Image: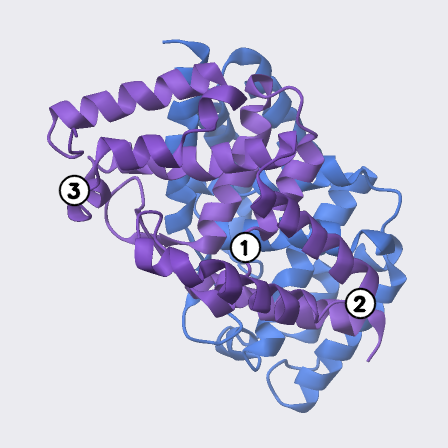
Chain colours: A blue, B purple
Amino acid sequence: MTRLEQQIQFIREIDKVKNIYRQTYLADGQRKENDAEHSWHIALMAVLLKEYVPEADITKVMIMVLIHDLVEIDAGDTYAYDPVGAETKREREVQAAERIFGILPTDQEGFYRELWEEFEDYKSPEAKYAHLLDNLQPLILNDAAEGKSWAEHEVKKSQIYKRNEKIEDTSLKIWRYIQDVVDRHIQQGNIKED
Amino acid sequence: MTRLEQQIQFIREIDKVKNIYRQTYLADGQRKENDAEHSWHIALMAVLLKEYVPEADITKVMIMVLIHDLVEIDAGDTYAYDPVGAETKREREVQAAERIFGILPTDQEGFYRELWEEFEDYKSPEAKYAHLLDNLQPLILNDAAEGKSWAEHEVKKSQIYKRNEKIEDTSLKIWRYIQDVVDRHIQQGNIKED
């Protein structure tokens, strides 16, 4: 197989992420969104909101968010507030990364695996910004869809605060925005105050 | 409205592109894909295949392809081989660009409108690479889905060659790959030789 053929095999394989559905509804509330749509949205948000996290290398962040959910082709989507799924998540996802990035030529396999591990590590400025986007986007959609997904899963304020505990340190402005949205949905009864 | 609120309004508005469906089937042939999925796929392809178009600035190409179909929120998707739709396409899309990018703060509106116009112009190395990706991705999916979309629309070899006439100049290696796929699907009866 030539190098280009290996790359095209990977391009075909990752098409499957368009069939991995998340728990978040589209802004119009009509259906849930899939990983490809979510990743497109946050890659564009990375550029739009870069002024709030100026220390992050925007090219790296874009590539990171474009690939961050590919492991879910094998591992499936683990809902943010699913403690049982969370226990086996890491193991399932590492195996998936091995198989999926393993389709690529070795140099590219290494590049994408490292970038995915950096995202998972949640330490570099790029990983922090990528996680901020990964959390902010479903919040914007849940807000637009009138809190439907939060209400369905009976999400508590403490769960949202726990999940977003590093956001304040990444961008105070965006953390304040998130707090405002959460407060509004507590008042509306979609998020439980605890 | 604050600057962040304007940006978030834009992020909510562009969610609609997830409901703009194209004529291309997913690789598994089960349903057609939408603009957000398509844009995610080609943004990632921009990074994967950059060695074939080394003169293009990859960051610019990624942003360009992430936004290139937003105008279809208002203008709809015009099928590549639809001569009637093509007549009014430009006018419909310019109006859409004005409204949609107009939601953003002025500096960002200007940046994205110029980038979209550069894509439409099809002259810079980045625009040429973006168009190559925009054409190659549905070809890879059509090939994976056994030529279903070509057969349904009775697409002719001359139409594909006309649409891809600038690809050879952008990357000869990828043009040869496209020719091979087309030849195979002529033999299989999915594309008409003319």
Residue A40, placed above or below residue A124:
below
Q: Are marks 2 and 3 in contact (CB under 8 Å)?
A: no
Question: In the image, what residue occupies the spot 49% across and 76% down?
Answer: A28
Q: In the image, A112: left or right of B171?
A: right
Query: Which residue in the rendered view is the most extreme toward the bottom?
Result: A188
The tag on residue A38 is 1
The tag on residue B151 is 3
Is residue A70 visible in the rendered image? The answer is: no
SS at mark 1?
Answer: helix
Provide residue B137's location: percent of width, then percent of height.
41, 36
Q: Calculate the distance from the C-alpha at mark 2 to the C-alpha at mark 3.
A: 45 Å
Task: Identify which amino acid the numbered label 2 is placed on.
Answer: Pro
- Judge the density around disc 3: few (<14), some (14-19), many (≥20) Cα neighbours within 10 Å: some
Question: In the image, what residue occupies the spot 70% across and 54% down?
Answer: B112
Task: Identify which amino acid the numbered label 1 is placed on.
Answer: His
The tag on residue B105 is 2
The tag on residue A20 is none
Q: In the image, B30: left or right of B98?
A: left
* Residue B168 location, quadrant: top left
